[in-house]
Image (tube, helix red, strand yellow):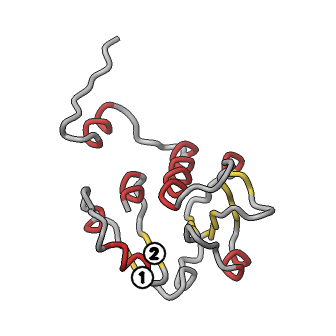
Amino acid sequence: MRAAGCYRVDSVKYTGNRYGYAAKFHTDTKDITDKIPLTNVESLLDDLPADTKIVCVELAEGATALPAFEHPENALYVFGPEDGTIAQEVVDQADAVVYVPTVGCMNLAATVNVLLYDRLAKAENVIMGDELIRQSRDNRNRLIVKK
């Protein structure tokens, strides 16, 4: 959820009960769940707006390497579990399947961060500058680069 907040994700959906079990042991230091809807759903693919593109993120043969991928305007990114993979029937309905070209696999949080950073880095209207830095940094960080 922290990555979702950092990269201004509109909402997060998940299936199954793992998150419910794990949430008991996590802290939400940025109160992200108060700002971004987090919803448990039966199927990630139900009730999507017509213009939504489904993008699976997985180490799958035939997938597109993330550096070569052009992100759609409205995307639903589907990530598999750390100890498994995305169901074939979900991949079969995807508009794209991408992978991060690392040696070995990353954990889910790292993969989400890399994917969302790639989307941000390739976007046309990225908010940047000192004001964003002041809003984003920890309250104990007042570092200034002296030229």
Query: Which residue sits furthest top?
Result: 147
Task: Say which element carries label 1.
Answer: strand
> Front-most of 38 and 70?
38
Quarter of image, res 20: bottom left
Residue type at numbered disc 2: Lys
Cα distance in 3D space between marks 2 and 1: 6 Å
- The image's mark for residue 13 is 2
Q: Is residue 128 above or below residue 73?
A: above
Q: Is residue 134 left or right of residue 1?
A: left
**On screen, residue 22 above or below 132:** below
* Mark 2: few/some/many CA within 10 Å (<14, 14-19, 20+): some
Left or right of 139? Residue 11 is right
Q: Quadrant of residue 146?
A: top left
Q: Please report the residue visible at 48 percent of the width from the left and 84 percent of the height from the top.
A: 16
Kindly identify the residue that appears in the image at 74 percent across and 64 percent down: 60
x then y, percent, for residue 22:
37, 73
The numbered mark at residue 40 is 1
Q: Residue at x 43, y 70 (%)?
A: 12
Question: Would residue 48 be seen by someone viewing this image from the given angle?
Answer: yes
Query: Can you give x and y, in whole percent of width and height, for residue 65 in the image?
Result: 72, 52
**Residue 102: x percent and y percent?**
66, 48
Label pair 2/1, CB-CB below 8 angstroms? yes
